[in-house]
Amino acid sequence: MVCAMIVSLFLFCLRCVVLAGLMIAASLASAFAASSDWVVSEGGRMRLILLAPAADGSREAGLQIVPNPGWFTYWREPGDAGIPPQISPQPGSAIKLSQLAFPVPEQKQIGTVRDIGYAHPVTFLFTITPDGRQQAKAFAVNAFIGLCHNICIPFQASLSIDALAATSATSEEAMLIAAAKAREPEQPTADFHVADFHLAKDQSRLDLDLVLPNGSATAPNLFLTGPEGVLFTDYRVVKRDGNHMSVNIVLTRLSPGEKLSGQVWRLLVDAANGRAMEAPLAFANTGSIVP
């Protein structure tokens, strides 16, 4: 009888030790997790991912979005009817965020509506920095995106990672951040850049001289963006000589009397050969004015 009781007590203690070990293992696993929980909507899901802090305390971060099959999410300029992605710190989170960086988008035409964005999983990168006034207890952000499938629906979520838990990133998060960086457009280079640009005096047209990389035999995709809500993708080829191409873009949709002098627009050139480049166009003392 006594032996049976001793055996039962031993087994009970053993189960307690095993359970405690499992709880500790789970705790350690979560301590090294650098991603928030997924938040799910009708059109897809999204979460926050985070890398370990740099020497200055800043962290590389990403807003990871996975649209459901047939659904589409948007670039910084969404096209004719989409919702541009937005991200901001949650009140009291004691952090500052950089602007989102975007991989090269694609165009999708639905009837007469043009969408600019992504029909596949995508990660928008940004940087989280402590605001210096107090220690952040959590890396907490509010994210707002659009998802489209016949109709476009807004998707808003609060995403958070406990500051004490986010001590390092797993290889999954590190690979996601690295893959997103690889999909961003490159800076201008000697073999891929805007050689010159000319703004018509009446601001009705922009002429561009482009140097394209080797292997870009097909016509590139152009995304010319100005102030928020200003996007041009249509252009006319004036001349093509090898890797040099001259095009013009008719500047419709500008507000009457709007002055471009002093503004900096951006031109994204997707060469459709695995390379894309983005360059600023400063309408001030750079670029020429033609009649």
Image (cartoon, grey):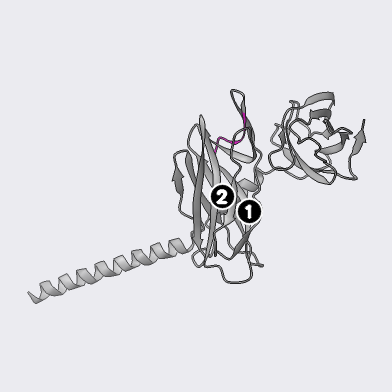
Q: Quadrant of the C terminus?
A: top right
Q: Nearer the viewer, residue 46 or 133?
A: 133
Which secondary structure class fits the magenta region best? Answer: strand
Instruction: Bin the neighbour count of mark 1 within 10 Å (Cα to Cα): few under 14, some 14-19, many 20 and up.
Output: many
Q: x, y (%) of residue 283?
A: 85, 42
Q: Which residue is mark 2?
A: 63
Q: Which portion, as a residue range, is magenta?
A: 114-121
Q: CA distance from mark 1 to mark 2?
A: 8 Å
Along the line of sight, the residue nearer the viewer: 201 or 157:
201
Q: Residue at x 11, y 71 (%)?
A: 4
| Among the two numbered marks 1 and 2 on one chain, the one whose residue lies closer to the N terminus | 2
Q: Which residue is mark 1?
A: 126
Residue at (77% x, 27% y) in the render: 235
Give, as a three-letter code, the residue at label 1: Phe
Quadrant of the rendered structure where residue 248 is?
top right
Tell me the quarter of the image containing the N terminus: bottom left
Query: Could you tell me residue 211's position as x and y percent?
Result: 83, 34
Give the SS element for disc 1: strand
